[in-house]
Amino acid sequence: MGIVHHSSYINYFEHSRIQWIKKNGFSYKELELSGLILPVSKLNVSYLSPAFFDDELTIETELMEVPSSKLIFDYLVFRNNIVITKAQTILAFVNKVSKKPMKCPKEIYNKVSSLFL
């Protein structure tokens, strides 16, 4: 059909989120080595217009609030400076060993909370 499959966007969001984490001074690999994982607990996507094969897309990723026990990211997907998709993911802070939810670690909270001042 020449249209980007809807499931591809999940990978786009993950890649954009990992880049956001890296840009803000963290390494996802190091977070996991420290015993923290961040599974997606919720995903909401609104497809406003299709993306086609060979389209060049830009994704803006924004953390929506100071983290407590979760991270809330909003995404805008642009094609030619026009928003074609809006989405939100919620990621839970989870202890890698026990698989139980946990509060945001202080080093993450301290760095990320400064984005909201």
Image (cartoon, helix red, strand yellow):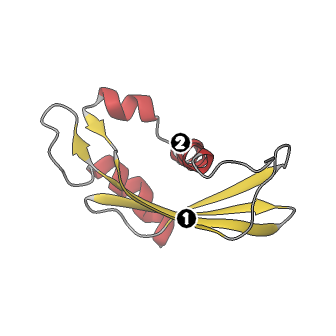
Q: Is residue 24 left or right of residue 12?
A: left
Q: Residue at x 41, y 70 (%)?
A: 65
Task: Indicate which disc residue 12 carries.
Answer: none
User: 94 or 3: nearer the eye?
Assistant: 3
What residue did someone put label 2 on? 18
User: 37 or 87: nearer the eye?
Assistant: 87
Where is residue 56 drawn, in percent x and y?
83, 49
Looking at the picture, which amino acid does disc 1 mark?
Ala
Q: Is residue 82 left or right of residue 91?
A: right
Disc 2 packing (10 Å; few <14; some 14–19; many ≥20): some
Where is residue 41 drawn, in percent x and y?
33, 55
Vertical comparison of 114 with 16: above or below: below
Where is residue 21 drawn, in percent x and y?
51, 45
- Marks 2/1: CA–CA distance: 16 Å
Q: Is residue 41 left or right of residue 28?
A: left
Indicate the quadrant where residue 71 lies: bottom left
Q: Secondary structure at mark 1?
A: strand
Disc 1 packing (10 Å; few <14; some 14–19; many ≥20): some
Q: Is residue 55 left or right of residue 115?
A: right
What residue did someone put label 1 on? 87
Q: Secondary structure at mark 2?
A: helix
